[in-house]
Image (tube, rainbow, N blue to C red):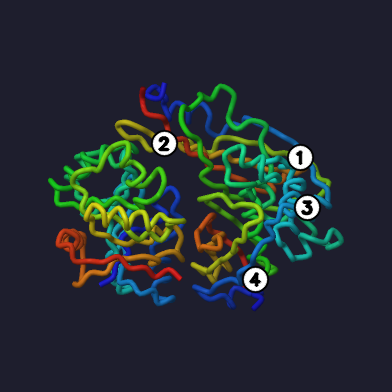
Amino acid sequence: MILDLHAHSIKSDDGRAKVQNYCQWIRTRNIPIDGFVLTEHRQFDNESDYGELGREYGLTILKGSEVETEYGHVLVFGVTPALQAEFDFANIRLPLRQVIEACERHGAVPVPCHPGRPRVGMHAHLAEHGVPEGVRIVETLNGGSRDEEDSIAQAMASQYGYRGIGGSDAHIVSHIGRCATRFPHAIHNEQELVAALRAGEFEAVTFRT
Amino acid sequence: MTKSLDIDALRERFLMKDFDEQVFEFSAAELVDYASSCGELAPRYTDPAHPEFQAPPTFATCLRPGRRLPEGFPNLPGLGMDAGKAVAPKAPILPGVPLTARSHLHDIYAKTGRSGRMTFLVTRMEIYDPAGTLLANADTRIVIREKPEA
Amino acid sequence: MTIRHVSEVEFGVELPVFEPDTSLDNVRRFVRAAHWDGPRFTDHDAARKEGLPGALVPGIMSQGFLAAMIHRWAPDALIENVDTVFRAPVIVDEAYRIAGVVTDIDAAAGRVEIDLTVTNEKGETRVFGTATVRLPA
């Protein structure tokens, strides 16, 4: 199963895509993914239920978040009410340690995203803050990467032994599925996604042309 | 200062109140240059002799207010970034017609955390012709990432 | 294919790409017309002194490129809204690709939504956005 683990809808400030249009796009253009995770900026979307939409289009639509730390942006998979009580998702200077520890306590998985990107990526902050403890996975393929950002991410992952995921970082409909993550088994919900990430059986894939 | 900034109070005091008014006028040659340099081919934007000759639809975003923010608006400490521009044309902008552009803060909101905040300012410029017809709305979004507390 | 009616539009169709003229001369012509004349748009050296990678194509000119692309595809399209996010600078004298794809159609209302992108030669998105246009039934 292939999931795009990083996408934004109109729920994000800079998102311009409606979720239904993502689904239409994937099916109309035969984008080779089986679903996607909505990782809205600095929030978790508690309101939306995309179950019916997912069934209509035969896609797995899951929800996560993209929070901001002193090491840059971090995707969080497996968000629960208990995790939301642990830290303020809207805080733009969350301590990464706090995010990681809270995720461990509540069965979630933190993944620094676009880590090779200046300012908002983890690599740019290593010199100042050191190598953080507890990071196991980073996003090594990001559909919005420019210049050498993915190469930096992959080199960093190789150096520190991180596993790599892929995500499109789509903000508009036509960018969904540019990068994604391949899993060996089907994933139907956030708990299964967390389990698959923790099992470490996945690989980042790109469909950029 | 950052902590004392009250978004609700800012909204109450500044939202939807015009803080700037400018009058602009553009010649037909300027409208043609604007459109042609952008690659427009449609004659209604490139040919002044066309019966529907007018400015191209995104033209309103080039009009700039005399000041970015209302008088008395607090100086938000932090890095201001242009987060985007939106334009909604409503009626043709014609050459030689004075354009009155009034600006107001259309939205102010913050994403607040325990140790930092991003403040979003949406300035809307409304462009009118002399008859008071609304010709376009042009929104500019600025995001200010507040600096950490010292 | 030139589009005249909303019924001719299909979901997912790509608008014809065009490569805009980002030469210094053309940008000078634009900023003078827009009353935006300034060295950061018209002088590479002056822009570099400001810490920029080179003279900038103004964001509003990128918006103009995007609107022009829509009219090249559908000359009678009435643009109701263009909403753009400027992600990275567009630099004078560099090559870019102005692209759009149809991502939503409301045939009853005659409205079409289009994803818009300005990408550089490496395929990196510098500007993205959406437009809503109206077409005759």
Determine which residue is flagged by label 3.
Answer: B31
Position in image of residue B57 (x %, y %): 68, 55
Q: Amino acid at mark 4?
A: Trp
CA–CA distance in space, label 4 to label 1: 31 Å
Neighbourhood count class around disc 4 (C-alpha, 10 Å): few under 14, some 14–19, many 20 upward: some
Q: Quadrant of the C terminus of chain C?
A: bottom right
Q: State whether residue A139 appears in this view.
A: yes
Mark 3 lies on a secondary structure that is helix
Residue with the most extreme front position: A159
Residue with the most extreme left position: A105
Tell me the quarter of the picture where residue C3 sits: bottom right
Q: Amino acid at mark 1?
A: Phe
Tell me the quarter of the picture where residue A180 sits: bottom left
Mark 1 lies on a secondary structure that is strand
Q: Amino acid at mark 3?
A: Leu
Q: Residue at x 40, y 56 (%)?
A: A9
Q: Amino acid at mark 2?
A: Met
Determine which residue is flagged by label 4.
Answer: C73
User: Is C102 situated left or right of B145 in this image?
Assistant: right
For disc 1, the chain is B
Neighbourhood count class around disc 3 (C-alpha, 10 Å): few under 14, some 14–19, many 20 upward: many
CA–CA distance in space, label 2 to label 3: 37 Å
Q: Residue at x 83, y 52 (%)?
A: B28
CA–CA distance in space, label 4 to label 2: 39 Å
Do the residues bearing badges 1 and 2 touch, measured as CB atoms within 8 Å? no
Mark 2 lies on a secondary structure that is strand
Determine which residue is flagged by label 2.
Answer: B118
Q: Which mark is residue B24?
A: 1
> Which numbered disc flags the more N-terminal residue, 2 or 3?
3
